[in-house]
Amino acid sequence: MTGDAKRRPVRPYGGVGAADRVAARRSKLLDAGLELFGTRGYAVTGVKDLCRAAGLTDRYFYESFGGTKELFAAVFDKVIDELFAEVAVAVDAEQAEGTRKLRAGIGTFLMALGEDPRTLRIVFVEPTGAGAEHRMREALWRFARLVAATATDARPETRPPTELVDIYALSVVGMLERVLVEKQGGRLDVPMAELVDYCTAFAGASLGALYTGRITKQSGRHEVSSRATE
């Protein structure tokens, strides 16, 4: 953090308190970061670009952020927190019947990121260049935990091994990430409504196999052994 970042206003101005003015400028920079990082990309976006987009002079940038990496991290965290809350609310609102909760979570996740390409780029494309790979991994693990909780809550009387539930949850999140990126890139030409259907079907089938014992620690070995003897 630079010296300018520590030198914040302390007196009211125009009837607005100092803390409120700082918060308002920070919010403008977050909005500018979402727009520029999400459209142009992190590598080609500098402090001057961000301040210009926010309608602020350069000195106000360092009032809240130490550099563009710090701003990107804040934008990333804001996008993830809002997305997670939206998905969690959708899952919680659904009845625990069949794949309804699973569909609610998958549909909300896909639709939210699919409707705003900026958030998709910030979550899945830009973190590497912005030095935020760890943040991305932690965010995906956070969503995987929600998938795992949804899966186990669906049938509380049956508990598959924890590691299998973890692998299942990670596979669902990984599937959603890849289909979104490839759809955005033009390689996957599937309407969003159908994509939700397909992803829910794949996730539901895997979950069913997990709970009926068709996926176990030994099932993969048995499959390989049977093929080898054919």
Image: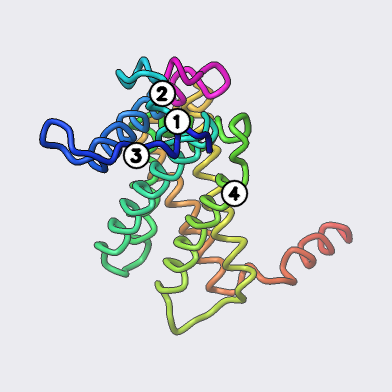
The foreground one among 74 and 188 is: 74
Tally the numbered discs.
4
Residue for badge 1: 62
Name the residue carrying label 2. 59
Query: In screen coordinates, is 117 left or right of 9?
Result: right
Q: Which marked residue is nearer to the observer: mark 2 or mark 3?
A: 2
Instruction: Residue lying at the far bottom in this picture: please name it.
Output: 157
Q: Which residues are magenta?
A: 36-50
Location of mark 3 (residue) = 111
Mark 3 touches mark 4? (CB < 8 Å):
no
Is 46 magenta? The answer is yes
Say whether residue 81 is left or right of residue 213: left
Measure how far apart labels 1 and 2 are at the Cα level: 6 Å
- Element class at badge 3: helix
| Label 4 close to label 2 by CB (< 8 Å) | no
Disc with the residue nearer the chain's start (4 vs 1): 1
Q: Are marks 3 and 1 in contact (CB under 8 Å)?
A: no
Q: Separation of disc 2 and disc 3 at Cα? A: 37 Å
Q: Residue at x 32, y 60 (%)?
A: 91
Q: Nearer the viewer, residue 41 or 219?
A: 41
Cα separation between marks 4 and 1: 28 Å
Numbered disc in front, either 3 or 4 = 4
Q: Which mark is residue 137?
A: 4
Q: Earlier in the sequence, mark 2 or mark 3?
A: 2
Label 4: few (<14), some (14–19) or many (≥20) C-alpha neighbours in 10 Å: few
Residue in view at x 42 percent, y 46 percent = 80
Local crowd size for mark 1, using a 10 Å CA cut-off: few (<14), some (14–19), many (≥20): many
Residue kind at label 3, given as amino acid type = Met
